[in-house]
Image: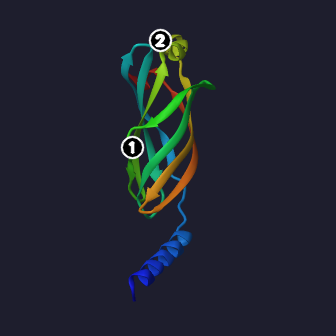
Amino acid sequence: MNIKQQIVAISLFLIAFSSCMTLQNPTFQGVENVKVNQVSGNNISVDISFKVFNPNSIGFTIADAGVDATINGNKVGNIILDDNAYLKANTTSTGKVTVTLPYSTISNYLPQIFMGQSLDLKLAGDVKVRKFLFSKKFKFELNHKLKPSDIKI
């Protein structure tokens, strides 16, 4: 078998393998904590740690995310993925994302926090996962009742 035939054979194998492989959506199980990371100028950087369950028999890397954050129904920022987190097969893992918010946006919610009231946090968007050459996008929505005790400063 020459090199061209080997490349064709491997390509056909990979195409056949990828069409048989179906991935189930990872399940976001909730927010673990919210930590004010940095206050700089007019912005506040907030780390959000969350739990996610991978129900698949293979692990994969979270390669990209397009996620919006809302509080009490109002959009407050976009999520930046910290790094390419690896989710092990059939396991619950902890992930972390960072949201940079203008102080003017978050200051609207400070009275509620100081009065001990909860905020409705919603993270929604899509996540792209990758395993070797294969990738797939999943849509997700995570709703969490953010209590003042969840926020670490």
Q: Residues within 10 Å of mark 1 (few under 14, many from 20)?
A: some
Q: Residue placed farthest to the bottom in the image?
A: 1
Q: Tag 2's secondary structure?
A: helix
Label ID, residue 114:
2
Q: Residue at x 46, y 51 (%)?
A: 53
Label ID, residue 94:
1
Mark 2: which amino acid?
Phe
Label ID, residue 22:
none
Question: Measured from the top left, where is residue 46 in percent x and y?
Answer: 42, 26
Question: Measured from the top left, where is residue 78 in percent x and y?
Answer: 52, 31
The front one of 19 and 147 is 19
Asked if 18 appears above or below 80 in the picture, the reply is below
The front one of 96 and 53 is 96
Position of residue 70 in the picture relative to residue 96 (left or right):
right
Mark 1: which amino acid?
Thr
The front one of 57 and 13 is 13
Q: Quadrant of the N terminus?
A: bottom left
Q: Residues within 10 Å of mark 2 (few under 14, many from 20)?
A: few
Q: Residue at x 45, y 56 (%)?
A: 130
Q: Residue at x 57, y 45 (%)?
A: 140
Q: Residue at x 43, y 19 (%)?
A: 44
